[in-house]
Amino acid sequence: MLAALALNLLQPALAREQAVLYTTNNDSAVQALLDSGQRLDPGLKIGVVNGSSAALLKRIEAEGQAARADVFWSSQPNTLGAFTALYAPYRSPQAQAIPEAQQHPQQLWSTANIQVVVMMVNRKQLGGLKEPTQWRDLLDPAWKGRIIVGDPTATSTAYTALWGLRQLLGEDDFRRLAANLVVSRNSSAVLNQVAQGEYAVGLTFEGNAYAYVAGGQREIRLVYPADGTFVTEEALVLVKNGPNPEAGKRLYDLLLSRDTQVALLEQAYRRPSRSDIEVSAHVELPELKDIAVFPTDEQAAIADRDAFLSAWKGLDKAL
């Protein structure tokens, strides 16, 4: 409430401006942001361009000195790290509520929310198979063609999941897993096709899958594997040479504010980065401390990206 009041008190002094947002987030998340902006900073107009992380970051790169975006929201450090020349350093006043470990040391990005990799399971499509409880359950050839994942060359969601799985499983078992996977170019198709019963399991982020549970689709279950899953940050950046730098900072501040992060949690199931929000007080998701996590090194994921993707292309898949 105090954060909201502080933002509103500033509004008379702020001119009406537009900020252009390039975002990978779904309609629910974008609408939660726009609604929050109307409440907290009504003088700020937000123009939205949607796309995948790879497509939008490459678009910003191609725009160069004539950047058209002010803010990019959001992707994981393992993807953002390949494009650091595109970002302008900025430390938001809202960053004081976000752990320092979740902020870039040179302030090139700050974490907007936390993502947890889950198995999205459609229990009606198990077809006699036992519901998986750990990653190694998916190595059984009986799962071949029944698991869908995004393309790690196009989506940071898939890269986070698959790079983590290679660390957890080792090379040989990861190769066995890959042979069972169907790969979709579009990460949103993973969700839709599991929900529609085309696949039994999808590898995705918690918040995206939970929307189907919250929507009343009872056959959908989120599985947090007992052998540990992967937690990553979704960060936002201020784009270098953006057309509206001051409006961009206002949008950046808005995304990190407590009110916006609560709205994103309640409406789009985005786990907040702020330390002053208790997740289970707002939605029926477990606290992070209650999830088995397999530790991964984001810097190693950044450094290994090209080599991993090259090796991935050579692996046999179900489709």
Image (cartoon, rainbow, N blue to C red):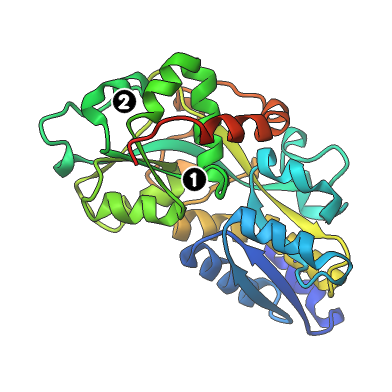
Q: Is residue 225 visible?
A: no
Instruction: Give the image location of residue 119, x and y in percent.
Output: 36, 36
**As drawn, 214 above or below 203:** below
Kind of residue at disc 2: Leu
Q: Residues within 10 Å of mark 2 (few under 14, many from 20)?
A: many
Q: Nearer the viewer, residue 101 or 275?
A: 101
Q: Which mark is residue 151?
A: 1
Q: Left of 249 or right of it: where is 287? A: left
**As drawn, 48 above or below 152:** below
> Alpha carbon of mark 1 to alpha carbon of mark 2: how far?
18 Å
Extreme residue in the bottom direction: 16
Instruction: Give the image location of residue 177, x and y in percent.
Output: 38, 26
Q: Residue at x 66, y 34 (%)?
A: 305
Q: Residue at x 24, y 41 (%)?
A: 200
Kindly identify which residue carries mark 2. Answer: 138
- Count all numbered tags in the image, as a single digit: 2
SS type, badge 1: loop
Q: Nearer the viewer, residue 250 or 1?
A: 250
Kind of residue at disc 1: Asp
Residue 101: image quadrant is: top right
